[in-house]
Image (cartoon, rainbow, N blue to C red):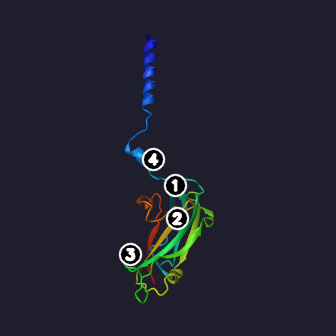
Amino acid sequence: MKNIFKSILVAIVVLGSFTSCEESDLSIDTLYNEVDTTGAALRMLSYPNDLVNVSGGTFSNCMCYSMEVQEGQGTPTPDFKEVRVYFSSYNDQDTEFPTTDADGNEFSEVLYQTISNPEFDQLSSTNNLPMYELSIPMEELITAFPGAQFTVPSFIVTRFELEMNDGRVWSVNNAGATMSGPYFESAFARKTIFLNI
């Protein structure tokens, strides 16, 4: 009789395990199945000073970044095409009033540099990922906006775009707010105070 009860109990457990392995219709499972979690981060390892000028002295006369690229699935060799660096200049810290020339014409965003994948030829000591050191002398920034009437201070926004080999482009407009936080440090845009002195 004991063997019959054991056999029945084992059969119930086996049947119960088959019926509990169905597809879940919970919201979290739908989220995991439908949301694209691949993507990439352009992680900033070091940022320029918040305040820069042309002459140096007390302030820095260079906007210098150290950056690395990390793909969403964590591969040590991310599959990306290039990183593009853009500038825009504003007369106010809220970035509502673009810098103008002497005739009052507003400057639009300027492509400063395109950095190809092979130029990320160092590995960062932080995460052992492809790394690049970007150095932008302030004299070059001034020549990017010919005839600009910079106020003191002006506010320079540096924006980055990361293009993957499959054509996807990541920048400030489509990288979630969590990317720019302290974990990912993937701020695709950075505002710097510029004193044209």
Q: CA distance from mark 3 to mark 4?
A: 38 Å
Instruction: State the residue at coordinates (44%, 47%).
Output: 32
Instruction: State the residue at coordinates (55%, 74%).
Output: 113
Amino acid at circle 2: Leu
Q: Position of residue 64 (x, y in %)?
A: 53, 72
- Eye-nearest disc, 4 or 1: 4
Tell me which label, 2 or 1, sits earlier in the chain: 1
Residue at the disc numbered 4: 33
Quarter where residue 155 is shown: bottom left
Residue at the disc numbered 2: 162
Q: Position of residue 10 (x, y in %)?
A: 45, 21
Amino acid at circle 3: Thr
Q: Do labels 2 and 3 touch, CB within 8 Å? A: no
Tell me which label, 2 or 3, sits earlier in the chain: 3
Tell me which label, 3 or 4, sits earlier in the chain: 4
Residue at the disc numbered 3: 95
Residue at the disc numbered 1: 72
Tell me which label, 4 or 1, sits earlier in the chain: 4
Q: Quadrant of the N terminus?
A: top left
